[in-house]
Amino acid sequence: MPLLSPEPRTLSPALATPGLLVAQLGRAATRRYKAALSPIGLKPRPTAALMQLRREGPISQQALAESLDIDPANLVAVLNQLEHEGLATRRRDPADRRRHVVEITKRGVKRLDQVERAISEVEDALFSALDPDERLQLQQLLARVSPGNYWCSAEADADPEGFEYR
Amino acid sequence: MPLLSPEPRTLSPALATPGLLVAQLGRAATRRYKAALSPIGLKPRPTAALMQLRREGPISQQALAESLDIDPANLVAVLNQLEHEGLATRRRDPADRRRHVVEITKRGVKRLDQVERAISEVEDALFSALDPDERLQLQQLLARVSPGNYWCSAEADADPEGFEYR
DNA sequence: TATTGTTATACTCTATAACTATA
DNA sequence: TATAGTTATAGAGTATAACAATA
């Protein structure tokens, strides 16, 4: 004898919340990026780091970790690998010798050129259900929600809901 | 002498693609869910499984794994735990004894009631930058993109870009 | 022979604490 | 005393292969 029959289905609406949707979709996206980047010899996180470095120019590890939303301790191995492959460099900041200034190399930029194609194929597959207008709409909504979202809100204005590591 | 100076910043637009945004936001969302669910004694994946079970009613492990977008092999431990805590049950399908029919229990439903509150607090924090209208808009766009998206497109119509495990 | 669920395993990702060198 | 980066480690998530039971 079943514990619960179909009745409970009427209790919950069919549509998942945006947060749950974004969590699930994000995993699917990462899986696809991983597969698409693999032939180029890159993984999602190092790739995201390179893209951020290209966008922002020279930057400290701490700032880079924050913009990637990963723990600074976990960024170390990523940068070791990128540096080892000659895609990024680290050097001490003369003004504060505790800091490392991280920078993308020419080779890193070239590698990113290959990446663009792979990325955009994944995008097309992921968002094929949306027309270009809707895709832009989605992009703009996500960008506004995104933390480290420095183009449209004035920096961290009071940091209304910052999430702390450690 | 720096390898690359600010010039390359002009090459790339400031806005990340929707796929990359969704990947990053998804990780942030999962992290917050994990923290919010922890006092209830649940983790994100088992919680997602319970929610799916409540939505869909009795269902095979295979189908559940597919709707959660996780590997069936990895669902086993999740269900062991849920069953051990009395939140879900497994029983053989008499019609095909290879199948396990999974079902949420009354206790599982009760536990989900507590979950709702935690979830909605996370939602509010995550999407505080959007007004209710925009949040709904985002939800609907994500729902259309989401795989296993059986409410608005007619099932897997030709499965245009299915992603295979193994 | 194919499918469902299971076990085992390897690998990656994430989080935390403790250390160093600099400030 | 505090901060930037590092190391080490434990835990969670992900992917794969091989197996038993059943179809």
Image (cartoon, coloured by chain):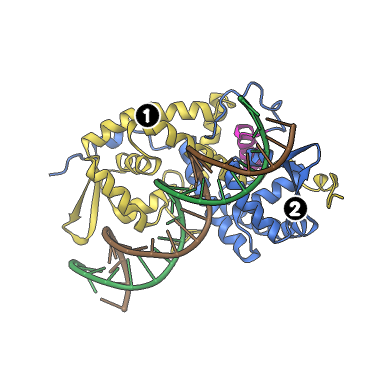
Chain colours: A yellow, B blue, C green, D brown
Q: Are marks 1 and 2 on the same chain?
A: no
Q: Residues within 10 Å of mark 1 (few under 14, many from 20)?
A: few
**Hey, what amino acid is under mark 2?**
Thr
Q: Is residue B136 magenta?
A: yes
What residue sits 37% from the left and 29% below the top? Answer: A116
Q: Would residue B70 be seen by someone viewing this image from the given angle? A: no
Instruction: From the viewer's side, name the closer residue of A78 and B60.
Output: B60
Res B118 → quadrant: bottom right
- Pointer 2 chain: B
Res B56 → quadrant: top right
Res A115 → quadrant: top left
Task: Give the structural element (helix, strand or loop) at label 2.
Answer: strand
What residue sits 38% from the left and 26% below the top? Answer: A117
The image's mark for residue B148 is none
What residue sits 38% from the left and 44% below the top? Answer: A45
Instruction: From the viewer's side, name the closer residue of B145 and B50.
Output: B50
- Pointer 1 chain: A
Q: Which residues are magenta?
A: B133-149
Give the label, 1 or 2, closer to the camera. 2
Q: Badges 1 and 2: C-beta atoms under 8 Å apart?
A: no
- In the picture, measured across the screen, residue B112 lies left or right of residue A57, that is right
Kindly identify which residue carries mark 2.
Answer: B89
Question: Residue B49, how many percent across, how many down?
Answer: 67, 48
Instruction: From the viewer's side, name the closer residue of B83 and A31.
Output: B83
**Hey, what amino acid is under mark 1?**
Glu
- In the picture, measured across the screen, residue B129 lies left or right of residue A159, that is right
The image's mark for residue A116 is 1
